[in-house]
Image: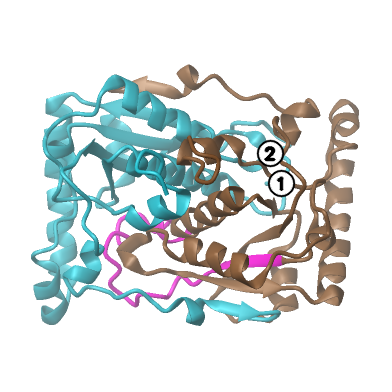
Chain colours: A brown, B cyan
Amino acid sequence: MSESTPSVYDVIGMRRDVRAEFTGQVVSHDVLGRLLGAAHSAPSVGNTQPWDFVVVRDRATLATFAAHVAEARRRFADSLPPERKSTFDPIKIEGVEESGTGVVVTYDPTRGGAHILGRHTIDETGLLSVGLAIENLWLAATAEGVGVGWVSFYDEQYLTELLEIPAPVRPIAWLCVGEVERFQETPDLERFGWRERRPLADAVHLEKF
Amino acid sequence: MSESTPSVYDVIGMRRDVRAEFTGQVVSHDVLGRLLGAAHSAPSVGNTQPWDFVVVRDRATLATFAAHVAEARRRFADSLPPERKSTFDPIKIEGVEESGTGVVVTYDPTRGGAHILGRHTIDETGLLSVGLAIENLWLAATAEGVGVGWVSFYDEQYLTELLEIPAPVRPIAWLCVGEVERFQETPDLERFGWRERRPLADAVHLEKF
């Protein structure tokens, strides 16, 4: 591999869900544009491209959302049995303010009209298309040395109102996007003993499940 | 960029949803192993890794599934208004038999138990994790020069029974994976006039939707 162009496999291996490593430096307009371009190049069912991207950098909005996430974190911690709670306690679950940029990825289930090629049988392929766009953005960011952290500790209705997202469009993910010093080598949830990686061989089945 | 290691951006741009370009040559065991490894390295909510992969190469199974897909295609064509039907008619929607390999990606919503970090608020993050794994596989395949085509013209219950997938595990996608001569430069659904790409600028919003 060349230093300047890590391969897709390199990037897939380097990619981390970043929480604690944001430096506070906001990503440049050019880099952010490339990341959004990568997301927008994802495949989608019937080529519907059902995603939109809300870029949030207003400090007040970031602080408001971070406070909402902190409350959702407390509720989750309180729901855990004592042993899991003590494992969870040191795990950071967001970098909303530290990253300096939120990219909120949304899903419009009505885009593409009534006859969506490939969604008439499996409706979830619309939502899944949004997932494909998110992974494109995440891998492009990793190749740029930019950190991404997916935050899902929030109430959908709250975020919908905060960003004035009109029905039937729905927020699907809040991605913290920001400069990092480095990526951790081991995912946080493994490092902190929350959950280990399953062996690949256990996940592969031949001919029948 | 070096010829041997295309960048992530190169691969994101080259990636196509392949239907007609499969050569009939089945991908090697080594390549398939790398693709599945890439998928299995995807991020997942709470590190649950809720996916499994069923590799289907049995010719009889491929033929049976292809016939089922053909029937779903007919039903979709019959549902279209005349103008859309004539646009749809020449579009190939699967390469199940020609690719020689189906990788069926499944989702187990119970993996990770009762307390899934990050899914207590947004349940769909489990399903979306499967989408991230699919995009990893797709991009790795593209880097290898291997074609992938996502087939969603099927009934979920039919595929569940065909591959003996036990509840509550669900099939999420049938991916045709096979050798190709080349990738098309323009997505099929644009080439055939089904749907154009939306300008990126229309998809990006600042601060509020």
Q: Is the residue under label 1 in contact with that under label 2 (CB below 8 Å)? A: yes
Q: At which x and y percent is residue A190?
A: 73, 28
Numbered disc 1: secondary structure: loop
Quadrant location of residue B146?
A: top left
Which chain's residue wears label 1?
A: B
N-term-proximal mark, 2 vs 1: 2
What's the amino acid at mark 2? Gly
Q: Residue at x 70, y 30 (%)?
A: A186
Residue at label 2?
B46
**Is B24 inside the magenta-drawn segment?**
no
Q: Which of these two is toward me, A187 or A195? A: A187
- Quarter of the image for the C terminus of chain A: give it: top left
**Is A108 inside the magenta-drawn segment?**
yes
- Height in image: B150 above or below B116? below
Residue B118 numbered mark, or none: 1
Residue A181 numbered mark, or none: none
Q: Magenta part of the protein: which range?
A: A102-127
Q: Residue at x 30, y 56 (%)?
A: A121
